[in-house]
Image (cartoon, grey):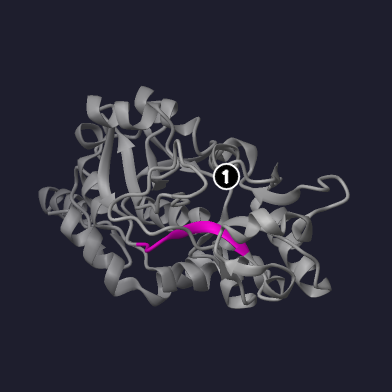
């Protein structure tokens, strides 16, 4: 009888269930903490928290660690950080491609988003700046976008300082008469955009999608010269400028991740998000004031069949 009870207990441990999944006895493979990177924009928070909660369901110990979009790559390469749900491939600096080539960072694949980045403005600015949406119009009507501090140059709100200097570099390279000003945070940028829009004030801002702001405001993109291949942001000139390289959004892990946590590696390789899923979640958090964890829990409840398949496949 004792042997039967022990066997039954062993089976129970091996079938530790979370959301209906039967877990192998050797998962998690160890008790070490998986350090999951959190950046400072809401979309990344959503994709990261969903992935983190799935890892928890598999029994892993995780810790969310805040890191800048560029400094994070050193932490990943050195094994001090372990997983990033969103690396935007057009804002990676010099270290990332070298670390990927060396195997210190491993790309799991695309997250599934279809992103766009560039400069946006409210449609009413086309009355004040004829020639928009072409970037060439900005040379002739920089003063229409000026602030008291920037006049006679226009004012351009760029990404926060630790996200890199892409807009600043392009402004300098094509000699556009605008003063780039780093946004303080995503929240501060969106608040300024909404305030300017409501007042009919001039504003030009670097932004990305997916983002809830496009569901809230009608915004136009500055258009650049088309290119047959990838837009090379460095060394552009006024006549042929292509603007911004458009990104892929990649999931990445520390180079030793697969060996240390193979089931987690397989699940994260399968994990994906769509623009519609992320836009809805971002809107709920940033515009409707819902708690991030509540929104993530709702996504998990609504998409159990999807994520259960990822976990089941990872446990094989």
Verify whether residue 118 appears in magenta.
yes
- Of the pair 272 and 249, the residue shown nearer to us: 249
- Of the pair 72 and 214, the residue shown nearer to us: 214
Is the residue marked by circle 1 packed among few (<14), some (14-19), or many (20+) residues within 10 Å? many
Is any atom of residue 48 visible in this view? Answer: yes
Vertical order, 86 against 258 (above or below)? below
Specify the farthest residue to the right: 148
Residue at image location 24% in from the left, 61% down from the top: 310
Which segment is the magenta one?
Answer: 113-120
- Of the pair 217 and 72, the residue shown nearer to us: 217
Vertical order, 114 against 189 (above or below)? below
Vertical order, 134 against 315 (above or below)? below
Expressed as whole percent of the image width and height from the top left, the position of residue 54 reads: 36, 56
Dividing the picture into quadrants, the one containing residue 81 is top left
Verify whether residue 204 appears in magenta.
no
Vertical order, 214 against 189 (above or below)? below
At mark 1, the secondary structure is: helix
Residue at image location 37% in from the left, 22% down from the top: 78
Dividing the picture into quadrants, the one containing residue 312 is bottom left
Q: Is residue 160 left or right of residue 46?
A: right
Q: Quadrant of the C terminus?
A: bottom left
Residue at image location 57% in from the left, 57% down from the top: 136
Expressed as whole percent of the image width and height from the top left, the position of residue 236 reads: 46, 41
Q: Is residue 94 left or right of residue 190?
A: left
Magenta-colored segment: predominant secondary structure:
strand
How many numbered discs? 1
- Of the pair 229 and 37, the residue shown nearer to us: 229
Q: Which residue is mark 1?
A: 167
Q: Is residue 144 left or right of residue 36?
A: right
Expressed as whole percent of the image width and height from the top left, the position of residue 275 reads: 42, 69
């Amino acid at each position: 009888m004792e042997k039967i009870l022990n066997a039954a207990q062993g089976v129970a441990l091996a079938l530790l269930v979370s959301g209906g999944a039967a877990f192998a006895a050797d998962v998690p493979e160890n008790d070490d903490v998986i350090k999951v990177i959190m950046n400072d924009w809401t979309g990344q928070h959503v994709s990261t928290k969903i992935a983190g909660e799935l890892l928890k369901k598999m029994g892993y110990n995780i810790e969310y660690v805040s890191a800048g979009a560029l400094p994070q790559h050193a932490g990943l390469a050195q094994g001090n950080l372990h997983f990033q749900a969103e690396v935007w491939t057009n804002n990676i600096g010099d270290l990332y491609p070298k670390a990927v080539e060396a195997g210190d960072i491993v790309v799991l694949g695309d997250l599934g988003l279809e992103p766009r980045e560039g400069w946006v403005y409210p449609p009413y600015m086309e009355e004040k700046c004829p020639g928009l949406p072409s970037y060439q119009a900005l040379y002739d009507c920089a003063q229409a976008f000026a602030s008291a501090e920037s006049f006679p140059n226009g004012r351009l709100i760029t990404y926060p300082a630790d996200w890199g200097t892409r807009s600043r570099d392009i402004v300098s390279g094509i000699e556009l008469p605008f003063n780039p000003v780093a946004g303080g945070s995503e929240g501060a940028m969106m608040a300024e955009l909404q305030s300017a829009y409501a007042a009919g004030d001039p504003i030009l801002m670097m932004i990305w999608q997916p983002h809830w702001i496009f569901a809230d405001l009608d915004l136009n993109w500055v258009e650049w010269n088309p290119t047959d291949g990838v837009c090379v942001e460095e060394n552009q000139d006024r006549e042929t400028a292509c603007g911004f390289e458009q990104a892929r959004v990649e999931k990445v892990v520390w180079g030793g991740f697969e060996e240390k946590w193979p089931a987690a590696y397989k699940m994260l390789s399968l994990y994906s998000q769509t623009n519609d899923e992320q836009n809805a979640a971002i809107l709920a958090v940033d515009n409707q004031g819902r708690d991030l964890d509540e929104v993530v829990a709702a996504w998990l409840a609504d998409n159990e069949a999807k994520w259960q398949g990822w976990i089941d496949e990872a446990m094989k």
